[in-house]
């Protein structure tokens, strides 16, 4: 418990995610930059949820609550990534397979479940894009 409270490697990483999830960064492929990348949001959402559970086990209720609050803030960003036709990665690269990577990689923390209409729509659109 002492290492977690004093700043062990896990806590440092979680505190970084807590403090920076909303910052501009690069995408999974390191080709574009945005503040609102679907894959990165998935990464932050899962890590902050798992971090909250870990902090609770370590007896650090302050970190548990702040990580959970940040995870909920991230969660609010996901619905805007569905444009009625497909789930998009970012406004500066909409059709990207990183979306599918995020949905399957971060399950069960994925906002859009693999069997949802939104994911089916996205798979259909991406199939058409990559086939052409």
Image (spheres, rainbow, N blue to C red):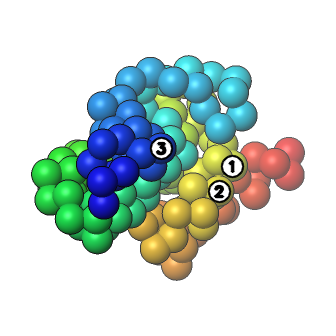
Residue 129 appears in view: yes
Task: State the residue in front, 63 or 131.
Answer: 63
Labels 2 and 3: the sequence-earlier one: 3
Determine whether label 1 and label 2 are within 8 Å by CB: yes
126 is higher (above) or lower (below) than 120: above
Q: Tell me what residue is drawn at x 49 percent, y 29 percent.
A: 91
On the image, which quarter does residue 77 sit in?
top left
Residue 52 point in image, percent of width and height? 28, 60
Numbered mark located on residue 9 in the image: 3
Q: Is residue 52 left or right of residue 87?
A: left
Which quarter of the rendering shows the C terminus?
top right
Q: Name the side, left or right, on which 44 lies relative to 67.
A: right
Mark 1 lies on a secondary structure that is: loop
Q: Tell me where residue 12 sits by quadrant.
A: top left
- Give the SS element for disc 2: helix
The residue pinned by badge 2 equals 101
Compared across the picture, whether 41 is left or right of 69 comes to right
The mark that comes first in sequence, 1 or 3, is 3
* Relative to 87, 68 lies left or right: left
Which residue was labeled with disc 1? Answer: 97
Residue drawn at x 51%, y 24% as measured from the top left: 25
Task: Tell me the CA gap for discs 2 and 3.
Answer: 26 Å
């Amino acid at each position: 418990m002492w290492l977690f409270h004093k700043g062990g490697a896990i806590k440092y990483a979680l505190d970084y995610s807590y403090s920076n999830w909303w910052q501009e960064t690069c995408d999974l492929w390191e080709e574009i930059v945005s503040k609102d990348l679907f894959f990165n949001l998935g990464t932050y959402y899962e890590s902050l949820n798992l971090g909250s559970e870990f902090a609770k086990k370590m007896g650090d209720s302050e970190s548990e609550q702040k990580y959970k609050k940040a995870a909920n803030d991230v969660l609010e960003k996901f619905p805007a990534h569905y444009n009625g036709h497909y789930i998009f990665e970012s406004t500066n690269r909409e059709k990207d397979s990183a979306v599918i990577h995020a949905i399957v990689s971060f399950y069960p923390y994925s906002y859009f479940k693999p069997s949802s209409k939104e994911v089916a729509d996205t798979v259909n659109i991406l199939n058409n894009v990559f086939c052409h």
